[in-house]
Image (tube, rainbow, N blue to C red):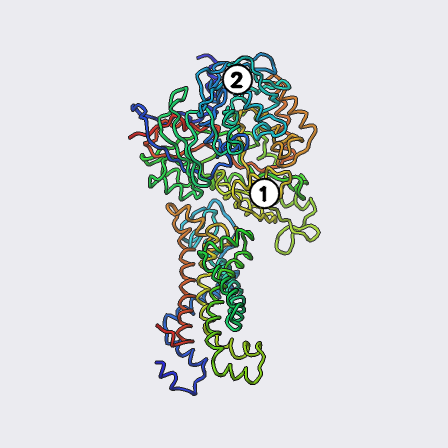
């Protein structure tokens, strides 16, 4: 397959990538799931049948049916509407925190990888310290220090994901910086910043893109975990993790309350994982296992 | 049966609904075994000097014994004192037991009683419970086994103060030896001795084999902290715990039908409410406070969130407390979102573009602090109230905190929140216990419990008068007037009166629920083999 792709030189890199991606059914499925979630998040007010925070206490724990398609929760809120609005929280936390990790991680990884020596040691040992924490523990520590809420949850998830990006970017930078074309650029007097921006970073894009998609899944999961523990999103904002958390008190008598948000989390994580895997295969066929 | 006795019986029944001991069957108690109890929160301290709330009291009541105690029938019984006599309106003389030793071997005597009260009422370090005990001056030693409890002024409910769980007698040598550590390793005379405290995990007490009275049947009682309601219920199902305090209301019906479990309950004396901080704008405006009561659909919350695990409340006192008067909140401030909105607008607020009321461009946002699981459904009530306030255009921001944090915050000189979820038990079953420390102008924390910062000289006069009057009828009338003032100036939304509920596996026998949650009767429980 690799040979086939290399054998069609007139196809641009992007088109070749899309061609490889398209052939991967699982990847397409991931793309569809992610696209679906995006639509849900953007059009929440139009798609949600009810106000997600409105309580009708008398309808508490009502089973799925005509009045509430996916049932009502312990406060008589419409679970379907809360799931739809919850997609906003999941995606916003995922996107923004991954963006934070991407920017911070890329900057740190590039500096460490390109400059090497003492700078590399200091930066990467600091990243190792962060990596040494069990993932939930680090996020809990950050949120405990900053207080719960949307912004701090995003920050915690972002900081948690930074070392992974720093490491992978540093790796590619190191492998690229000794290449002949980089040495050539240096020989003709290109500045360090120009070399990094024009010659080194473009080589990291594919790996960063793949990592971003995969980390979106982890970020959504971590947000759900934090909210589940009461440290993330605060009520009445609908967060899937929070919904599972409160619904679990009623698992025996009204299992639908925790089940649907649980499925939503699984669905979103699956979508981003498939997309990430697909992107990896498409962008860098040599990585394919 | 005479009319007087009937009246007494009725009163006792009203107080102790269903407080009969759990049926023990024909079997006689068996010695031995460990009772493991799952409860939502850990103790703040095991010393009434520092903690006067149930999580600590549940445990230290078995270690530290007062001179007299309050039975599940709400009558005063002998404990470390065998007899008592009212000598004058300011003095009660107690005759003490002669056969008692503290767990550390120190002999119990009048000096220990004096030491306990001196420690609590030392003006340099007033203890937590001193603020709740009335105008107690101290204890005077008459002889080795006779002690007088003396007040600075006539104080009607004095014997009830001595019977509070907080008035447990401490070992003077242990306090001297352990210092501040005493609050984590209390030493008293009770049927159980302290063994171990692993913070936020478990507290263990073991039987005192040298106890002066009938010895406990159990070898050991373990109080485990299981914050999650569902986890607590699962622990009960799997047998990891034998008993659950604060069980899940939604599951009570299922367990009650199951012969493998026993449900014990007594109508409690605790009112759980959302309090308002009058020093914070706009809660200083009574119109806003009234609107906040009218916005609350208390009936729907009682029906759908408490689900029968609590009763309705109409005031800061529970019915059954001496001096209780219904505040008539359902008539004064009935659930009426439209009128609530109108009152908020009267106070100068206008609906903003997002539907939230605002004044001078500042949205009407209130902050509320609550624990999760300290009281039955505390966090859920806060969330339901949040949605109800939203209907009248008030945004409520809730901080769900650990109980110890909430406790510390409401006990601080400055309260950094508009509202708070709190529960209050009138431990002596006398209105003085609540109306004075919670509402008198000089009782602002850290001294007392005037957490709303209510300042009303007229009110102060009423409770002072009621405290010293020895005529029950006059006291009742004065407390009635005081409660009318509270209703007029309203500073809390009461949500329910507790039922003290414990759910246990049916091999747990002779648990006696107590209307005062501090006094739950774990002492003579036994486990059927």
Q: Point out the residue furthest to the front here.
A: A118
Residue at numbered disc 1: B295
Chain of the residue displaying label 1 = B
Q: Residue at x 58, y 27 (%)?
A: B130
Label 1: state its secondary structure: loop
Residue B103: x %, y % from top left: 44, 25
Q: Is residue A79 above or below residue B213?
A: below
> Which of the marked residues, 1 or 2, is nearer the chain's N terminus?
2
Q: Is residue B311 visible?
A: no
Contact between marks 1 and 2 (CB within 8 A): the answer is no
Residue at numbered disc 2: B110
- In terms of depth relative to the viewer, which is nearer, B425 or A214? A214
Q: Residue at x 54, y 59 (%)?
A: A155
Chain of the residue displaying label 2 = B
Asked which quadrant contains residue B470, the reply is: top right
Asked which quadrant contains residue B456, the reply is: top right
Residue B423: x %, y % from top left: 53, 35
Q: Is residue A172 above or below residue A270?
A: below
Label 2: state its secondary structure: helix
Residue A103: x %, y % from top left: 54, 68
Dot 1 alpha-carbon crowd within 10 angstroms: few under 14, some 14 to 19, many 20 or more = many
């Amino acid at each position: 397959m690799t040979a086939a792709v290399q054998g069609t030189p007139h196809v641009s890199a992007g088109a070749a990538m899309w061609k490889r991606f398209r052939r991967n059914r699982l990847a397409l499925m991931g793309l569809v799931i992610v696209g679906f979630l995006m639509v849900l998040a953007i059009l929440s007010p139009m798609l949600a049948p009810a106000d997600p925070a409105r309580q009708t206490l008398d309808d508490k724990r009502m089973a799925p049916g005509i009045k509430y398609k996916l049932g009502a929760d312990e406060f008589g809120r419409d679970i379907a509407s809360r799931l739809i609005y919850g997609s906003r929280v999941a995606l916003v936390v995922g996107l923004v925190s991954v963006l934070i990790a991407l920017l911070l991680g890329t900057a740190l990884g590039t500096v460490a990888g390109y400059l090497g020596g003492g700078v590399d040691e200091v930066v990467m040992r600091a990243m190792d310290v962060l990596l040494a924490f069990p993932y939930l523990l680090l996020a809990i520590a950050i949120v405990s220090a900053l207080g719960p809420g949307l912004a701090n949850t995003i920050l915690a998830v972002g900081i948690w994901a930074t070392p992974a990006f720093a490491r992978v970017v540093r790796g590619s930078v190191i492998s690229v910086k000794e290449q002949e074309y980089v040495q050539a650029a240096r020989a003709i007097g290109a500045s360090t910043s120009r070399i990094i921006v024009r010659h080194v970073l473009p080589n990291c894009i594919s790996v960063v893109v793949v990592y971003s998609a995969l980390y979106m899944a982890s970020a959504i999961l971590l947000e759900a975990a934090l909210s589940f523990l009461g440290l993330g999103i605060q009520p009445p904002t609908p967060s899937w993790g929070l919904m599972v958390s409160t619904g679990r008190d009623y698992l025996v008598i009204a299992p639908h309350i925790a089940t649907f948000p649980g499925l939503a989390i699984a669905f979103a994580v699956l979508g981003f994982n498939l997309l990430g895997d697909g992107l990896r295969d498409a962008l860098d066929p040599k990585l394919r296992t | 049966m005479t009319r007087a006795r009937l009246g007494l019986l009725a009163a006792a029944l009203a107080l102790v609904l269903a407080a009969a001991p759990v049926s023990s069957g024909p079997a006689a108690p068996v010695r031995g075994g460990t009772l493991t109890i799952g409860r939502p929160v850990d103790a703040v301290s095991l010393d009434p000097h520092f903690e006067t709330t149930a999580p600590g009291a549940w445990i230290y009541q078995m270690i530290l014994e007062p001179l007299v105690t309050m039975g599940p029938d709400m009558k005063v019984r002998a404990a470390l004192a065998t007899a008592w006599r009212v000598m004058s309106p300011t003095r009660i003389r107690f005759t003490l037991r002669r056969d008692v030793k503290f767990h550390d071997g120190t002999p119990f005597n009048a000096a220990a009683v004096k030491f306990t009260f001196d420690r609590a009422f030392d003006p340099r370090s007033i203890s937590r419970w001193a603020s709740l005990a009335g105008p107690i001056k101290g204890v005077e030693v008459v002889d080795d086994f006779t002690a007088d409890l003396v007040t600075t002024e006539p104080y009607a409910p004095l014997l009830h103060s001595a019977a509070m769980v907080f008035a447990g007698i401490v070992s003077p040598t242990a306090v001297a030896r352990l210092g501040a550590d005493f609050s984590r390793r209390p030493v008293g005379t009770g049927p159980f001795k302290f063994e171990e405290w692993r913070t936020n995990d478990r507290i263990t007490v073991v039987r005192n084999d040298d106890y002066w009275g009938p010895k406990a049947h159990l070898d050991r009682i373990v109080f485990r902290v299981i914050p999650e309601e569902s986890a607590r219920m699962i622990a009960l199902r799997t047998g990891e715990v034998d008993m659950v305090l604060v069980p899940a209301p939604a599951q009570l019906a299922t367990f009650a039908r199951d012969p493998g479990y026993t449900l014990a309950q007594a109508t409690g004396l605790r009112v759980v409410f959302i309090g308002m901080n009058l020093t914070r704008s706009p809660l200083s405006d009574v119109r806003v406070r009234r609107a906040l009561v009218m916005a609350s659909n208390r009936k729907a919350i009682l029906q759908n969130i408490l689900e029968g695990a609590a009763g309705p409340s109409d005031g800061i006192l529970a019915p059954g407390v001496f001096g209780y008067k219904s505040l008539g909140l359902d008539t004064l401030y009935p659930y009426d979102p439209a009128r609530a909105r109108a009152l908020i607008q009267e106070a100068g607020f206008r609906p903003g573009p997002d539907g939230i009321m605002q004044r001078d461009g500042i949205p009407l946002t209130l902050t509320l602090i609550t624990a999760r699981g300290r009281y039955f459904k505390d966090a859920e009530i806060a969330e339901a109230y949040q949605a109800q306030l939203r209907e009248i255009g008030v945004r409520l921001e809730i901080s769900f905190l650990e109980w110890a944090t909430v406790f510390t915050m409401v006990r601080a000189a400055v309260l950094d929140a508009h509202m708070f979820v709190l529960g209050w038990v009138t431990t002596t079953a006398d209105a003085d216990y609540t109306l004075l420390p919670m509402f008198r102008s000089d009782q602002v924390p850290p001294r007392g419990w005037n957490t709303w910062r209510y300042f009303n000289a007229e009110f102060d006069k009423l409770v002072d008068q009621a405290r010293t009057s020895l005529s029950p009828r006059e006291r009742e009338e004065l407390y009635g007037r005081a409660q009318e003032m509270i209703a007029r100036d309203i500073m809390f939304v009461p949500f329910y009166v507790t039922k003290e509920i414990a759910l246990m596996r049916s091999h747990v026998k002779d648990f006696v629920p107590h209307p005062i949650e501090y006094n739950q009767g774990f002492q003579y429980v036994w486990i059927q083999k």
